[in-house]
Amino acid sequence: MRVVFGGVRGSSPVNGSQYTVYGGDTTSILVLGDTGERIIIDAGTGLKNLLPHLGESTDPLVLLLSHYHLDHLMGLPSFPPLYQSGRSIKIVGLVPPSGRPDTWQALTTLMGEPYWPVPLAEAGSMLVTVGVSTKDGSWQGEYTREYLTVGSLEVRVCPVPHPGGCLAWRIDDPANRSFLVFATDMEWSQAGLDQRRAFKDFCTNPTPVSTMIMDGHYAEKEYPSHMGWGHSTLQEVAQVGFDVGAKHICVTHHAPENDDETLDDRATILTELVRELGSDAQTSFVRQGQEMKIVGTDNSEETVHRNAGKVLLMVSELHQMGYERLRISPGMSPSGQHWRCVITHVDNFDPDHGALVLDGVNDLLTYSSAVGDQFFGWDDAAGDNPNSLARKFIERFPVIARLGRGDDEQYVQWYDEVVNLVKKGDLPCAYSDWSEDPEDAILPTMGGIRKLSMPPDGEG
């Protein structure tokens, strides 16, 4: 599966020499399946740049619309395939909770008098429109449908917060284990708890996403003056991408005022943010004209257990080296698809709860099974054993190592239970993110998980 980016700009198109790298056309991308499928997402001014990739006039197209704001539609009225009599086009758009306007009504208004001379009904192509409810993500008239089949590809949808409503799209190629989520015009800070859980579940079920492309219109300092405008920050993109275990985290919907130099700087910041979270996921700001191969994932339970086991046994090695004050907080991601483990020192744990971290930002490391054998962002540790991982840990994280040095005999005795689980092929689970009670770990979908008794509180 490949993606061609026709336009990646948000709000309005721009032009000039300062926009030559990332481009000035508004959102429109093309997903090309390995067996000839062509799925377009959004019809901004970048739609015209996709024409060389759309095949013959008889090749069918599917157009997925995130929402009906003009920057995502202004390329549609002059789109040549719309007027090709032999072209079959299926357009999928959002329908508000009231049911009006549906996809056909919205597009008919766009292309009606006095805005456009050729009505949609007279365009000439064999046109079918489909609606998706922004209330619950159900397919209009087909409420039990789980996904839309386009050749060998599967299309799923998830409503996301944006003024007037918006849809995020997921396209899966099960045969090649490549999975893409495209979430433009999403304001993460305006998402409620249920919406956040739904989106993360969307990114991790039925399988973890390979590549996540998300709206990152603002820097964190810009957001307070633009709250409610419908867009997310770089920090939110990094965190969400990390939480769902994406192998490639990408930013789209670039603000029209941000030139190439600004976006280059922000691309560097995105990478730094992701590395600070302990992930080595590939990061990028997508560019107009760019073609991207969506690489498949290998997330078998055997692989997950092997890599997670190395991390846990590394901590045991550190204890033997005199760093007994280092502790873990193992658990599952909100989707239940990824096992995670926080490593920090004893003073960073709630004295009344031996697995509850107090400061989730400073003096800690997080490993997620989503990153595989790229431990803590290292690109030279795939073949390491637990002992060599422990030595790299001390060398590369001297502050955490120093804070973890010292005796804690009671905790080390408890940790023997963890080591025994690992040697049996199991992984420990002391909490689950979706449980209201951190001591009430709901067993996730991944096999070989064992709920632990709580570790000793405070220092041994």
Image (spheres, rainbow, N blue to C red):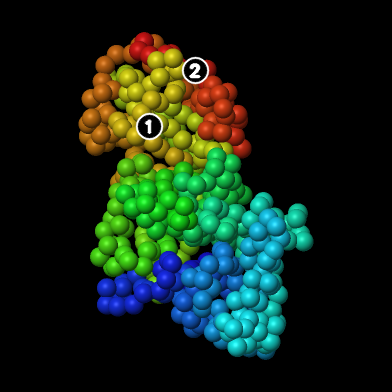
For label 2, the crowd category at 10 Å Cα-Cα, with few meaning under 14, some 14 to 19 and many 20 or more, is some
Task: Measure the alpha-carbon separation of dots 1 and 2.
Answer: 19 Å
Task: Tell me which amino acid carries mark 2.
Answer: Met
Q: Residue at image x 45%, y 56%?
A: 229
Q: Which type of secondary structure does the marked residue at label 2 adopt?
A: loop
Where residue 17 sits, quadrant-wise, is bottom left
Asked whether 380 or 100 is in front, the reply is 100
Q: Position of residue 78 (x, y in %)?
A: 54, 84
| On screen, residue 423 above or below 107 | above
Asked whether 160 or 35 is in front, the reply is 160
> Which residue has dot 2 on it?
454
Q: Which type of secondary structure does the marked residue at label 1 adopt?
A: loop
Task: Tell me which amino acid carries mark 1.
Answer: Gly
Q: Residue at image x 63%, y 62%?
A: 94
Q: Position of residue 251 (x, y in %)?
A: 40, 59
Q: Residue at image x 52%, y 17%?
A: 453
* Nearer-N-terminus badge (1/2): 1
For label 1, the crowd category at 10 Å Cα-Cα, with few meaning under 14, some 14 to 19 and many 20 or more, is some
Q: Which quadrant: the C terminus?
A: top left
| On screen, residue 96 above or below 5 | above
Asked whether 91 or 208 is in front, the reply is 91
Q: Would you say 203 lies left or right of 241 here?
A: right
Disc nearest the viewer among 1 and 2: 1
> Which residue has dot 1 on it?
360
Q: Can residue 137 be seen here? A: no
